[in-house]
Image (spheres, rainbow, N blue to C red):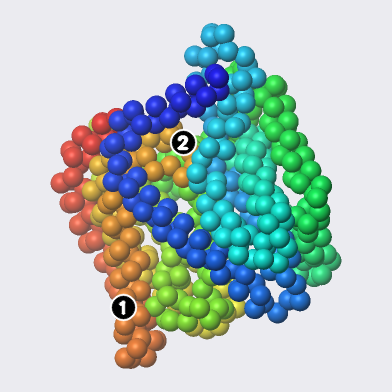
């Protein structure tokens, strides 16, 4: 079986690469996080029947779950569109061998099915099916329910790959997804139609009817055939040249308005172009935009009613662009870092330009989270405080500690959920950045008025902004100490 040989080669390539063992500590942390989430999902699956049964809806838990299935599909498609790595293969090395073209295409399409991350939600679905669905409807219905979810996972994987290959994960695609979701939300909000009702009717038929599984199976086949059609049109690399040229035009935009800031503006322009010309950096920006919805899990709920957790959420979502950019503020330039060090580029201008981008990211995050102000004046004050604290304290902490990240970051590596170049240091920096203010607010708000605590943190942020030059000088001195260690580390290939 040649297909099994290709899978075996990919497996050996992964474990034989030097990068796998260099990033062993990160891989261990990821496995720990994976086990943690598996445990949470399994517990949710065990008690999902009780949770859904308590909802004020005159439906069974299975009917409620089926009513949410279209939402799950849309959210899964969106997440995969921006984050799923497209399977690639060194096509030229196989084109000269007696291997059918269709076999290579099948390998590219089916390889993502073997990714364990695709099946994490089954730790919710299977316990729910065994404990709830089988009890209410019998084992056959429970089996059809699990199989239906399996086909949904496959459909999402294939359809997201097709959309991403066909249209690309660019700004227009991102805006298109936002518009589609906004339209669906608006139509449902104004009661033009109910997606929950439509989903319930469709998936109740699929799960409860003997021949219902034909629908998701046909959906998977159609998604598969769309991908096959795409590869039949674009099997050879030269077919992509016009498309790539067209998609890269927006990345060559002249950011002339930054010229007024001198060398600092030049650094900002270069960093913005670097971000916009690489899928790995762009996907981080899209992921950051997705995490702006994180506040919906905290605000307006009774589960997180402490000031500490509220302020943690405010600090996270208003500073999300700063957090995603600041950790790699130097490492993103690792492939051409030696070149930067030989140019007439001031270290102060280099660090200041990156710091100003983080400040701009904080302001953007604050503006985009203004709708959360509807939850009350406390949220407004916390967001203003977090903006000041992030801008005056956390930006400098990120710039200072970025000099300790000496691992080379390959922007040509896989574009989604890539941990190449990540070390345990990237996780440690999150402790003072995020959990210090959480602890301060959580503890002191129990003894003194919350507004006094917020005024104190706001004052720290304002002081940091007022003494910006002095703090940048500290960062410059630290950079000069670490400069040669950075050069040496960035030269090391994984």
Q: Which mark is residue 52?
A: none
136 or 29, nearer to the observer: 136
Residue plotted at (76% across, 69% down): 189
Q: Which residue is mark 2?
A: 414
| SS of the residue under disc 1 | helix
118 or 18, nearer to the observer: 118
Residue plotted at (73% across, 76% down): 57
Q: Quadrant of residue 159?
A: top right
Q: Is residue 313 left or right of residue 74?
A: left
Number of callouts: 2
Q: Is residue 175 visible?
A: no
Q: CA distance from mark 1 to mark 2?
A: 38 Å
Mark 1, residues whose alpha carbon is within 10 Å: few (<14), some, or many (≥20)?
A: some
Q: Quadrant of the N terminus?
A: top right
Q: Which mark is residue 440?
A: 1
- In this picture, is 359 found above or below 189? above
| SS of the residue under disc 2 | loop
Residue 170 location (% of width, % of height) = 59, 42
Q: Quadrant of the C terminus?
A: top left
């Amino acid at each position: 079986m040649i297909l099994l040989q290709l899978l075996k080669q990919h497996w050996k390539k992964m474990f034989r690469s030097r990068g796998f063992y260099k990033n062993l500590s990160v891989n261990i942390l990821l496995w720990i996080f994976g086990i943690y989430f598996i445990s949470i999902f399994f517990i949710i699956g065990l008690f999902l029947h009780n949770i859904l049964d308590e909802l004020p809806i005159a439906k069974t838990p299975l009917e409620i779950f089926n009513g949410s299935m279209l939402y799950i599909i849309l959210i899964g498609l969106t997440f995969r569109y921006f984050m799923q790595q497209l399977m690639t293969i060194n096509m030229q090395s196989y084109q000269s061998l007696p291997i059918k073209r269709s076999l290579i295409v099948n390998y590219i399409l089916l390889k993502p099915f073997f990714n364990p991350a695709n099946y994490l939600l089954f730790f919710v679905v299977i316990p729910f099916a065994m404990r709830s669905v089988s009890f209410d409807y019998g084992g056959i219905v429970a089996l059809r329910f699990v199989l239906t979810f399996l086909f949904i996972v496959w459909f999402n994987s294939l359809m997201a790959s097709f959309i991403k290959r066909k249209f690309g994960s660019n700004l227009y695609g991102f805006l298109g997804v936002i518009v589609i979701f906004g339209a669906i939300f608006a139509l449902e909000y104004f009661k033009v139609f109910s997606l929950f009702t439509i989903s319930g009717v469709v998936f109740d038929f699929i799960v409860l009817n003997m021949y219902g599984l034909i629908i998701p199976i046909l959906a998977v086949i159609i998604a598969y055939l769309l991908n096959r059609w795409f590869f039949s049109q674009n099997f050879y690399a030269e077919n992509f040249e016009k498309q790539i040229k067209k998609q890269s035009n927006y990345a060559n935009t002249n950011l002339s308005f930054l010229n007024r800031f001198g060398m600092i503006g030049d650094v900002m322009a270069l960093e913005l172009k670097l971000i916009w010309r690489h899928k790995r950096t762009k996907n981080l920006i899209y992921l950051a935009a997705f995490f702006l919805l994180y506040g919906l899990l905290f605000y307006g709920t009774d589960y997180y009613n402490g000031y500490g957790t509220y302020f943690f959420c405010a600090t996270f979502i208003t500073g999300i662009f700063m957090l995603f950019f600041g950790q790699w503020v130097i490492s993103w330039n690792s492939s051409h870092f030696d070149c930067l060090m030989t140019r007439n580029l001031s270290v102060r201008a280099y660090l200041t330009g990156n710091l100003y981008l983080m400040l701009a990211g904080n302001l953007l995050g604050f503006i985009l989270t203004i709708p959360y102000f509807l939850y009350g004046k406390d949220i407004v004050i916390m967001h203003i405080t977090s903006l000041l604290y992030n801008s005056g304290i956390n930006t400098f902490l990120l710039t200072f500690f970025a000099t300790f990240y000496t691992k080379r970051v390959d922007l040509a590596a896989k574009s989604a959920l890539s941990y190449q170049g990540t070390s345990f240091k990237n996780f440690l920096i999150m402790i003072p950045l995020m959990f210090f203010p959480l602890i301060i607010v959580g503890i002191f708000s129990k003894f003194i008025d919350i507004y006094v605590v917020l005024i104190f943190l706001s004052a720290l942020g304002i002081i940091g902004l007022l003494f910006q030059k002095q703090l940048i000088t500290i960062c410059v001195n630290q950079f000069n100490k670490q400069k040669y260690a950075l050069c040496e580390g960035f030269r090391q290939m994984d």
